[in-house]
Image (cartoon, helix red, strand yellow):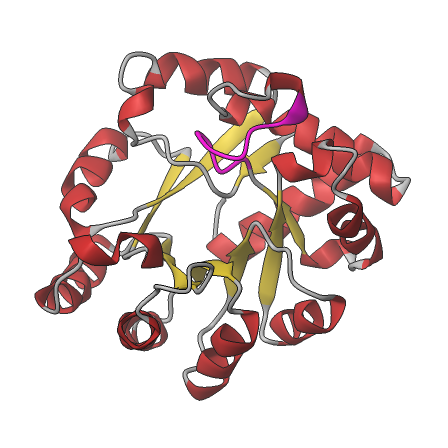
Amino acid sequence: MKLIDTHCHLDFEVFADDRQQVMTRAQALGVDHFVVPAVQQSSWQQLLALFQRQDFVHVALGMHPMFMSQHEESHIALLDHALQQQRPAAVGEIGLDFYSAESDRQAQLKLFRAQLQLAAEYELPVILHVRKAHDEVLQCLRDIPVVAGIVHAFNGSLQQAGHYIGMNFKLGFGGMLTYSHSTKLRHLAQQLPLEALVLETDAPDMTVMQYRGQRNSPEYLPYCLEALATVRGQSKAAIAEATSANARQLLGII
């Protein structure tokens, strides 16, 4: 069974001492491709340099809404240039995060819409971070349609899921499915069409129940597979084949 981790931050410092070993161990467990999205402009060059010779790692470039203090208006022009020169797998990790009442919503919206515009211009998929903002994100996508995308760590409603799917988006599920108390999320994963789902870890965050409190890793993607297969009442082989095909098709992974 071949798996694709559609969201892991292997460039983060927490992996500095054993990055290659982590990927090697994950590959031994069947995880043969890794999608690594950027979170801020200052990390793009390091991210590209780390993985430029590894054709099983697929980089996304973008600016994350939880790092607003790190972004500058000039970074949009730099992203434009980087997309033109580097042609990454996707624009990401981008989106809206309205979890905190102190969020600067207008600044986030301006940044998000500018990045969507670039994704549309370069016909690249997007990798979305959405927290407490699904309706606002969907409105932005109606205004600025993109070719495709993944909603990372999806936890919206079935109706919102349907809107994303209608826009050629896949929905990412990961470690939270392994927790028995995630009843709403498990019910959602059970109801959605399999052709709309992809697997992810969000390493080093959102770790699986089996390694609760520890650093998350792409090595633990098989636990996410097992949880999704269990809640859907399908075989791990069927889930692995479908979710990997979904990711390959969306991101152009050969």
Query: In the figure, is residue 41 to the left or right of 89?
Result: left
Percent coordinates x, y for residue 147 in the rendering: 47, 72
Report the magenta stretch's main SS.
loop
Percent coordinates x, y for residue 113 in the rendering: 33, 77
Asked if residue 54 lies in the magenta stretch, the reply is no
Say which quarter of the image contains residue 176.
top right
Percent coordinates x, y for residue 106 in the rendering: 30, 77
Query: In the figure, is residue 247 to the left or right of 91?
Result: right
Q: Residue at x 59, y 23 (%)?
A: 220
Q: Which residues are magenta?
A: 201-209
Q: Residue at x 56, y 27 (%)?
A: 31
Residue furthest to the bottom in view is 143
* 114 lies above or below 131: below
Say which quarter of the image contains residue 182.
top right
Q: Residue at x 44, y 75 (%)?
A: 146
Between 215 and 142, which is closer to the camera in this rendering? 215
- Count the labels in the image: 0
Could you tell me if residue 92 is visible in this image? Answer: no
Between 132 and 78, which is closer to the camera in this rendering? 132
Quarter of the picture containing the N terminus is top right
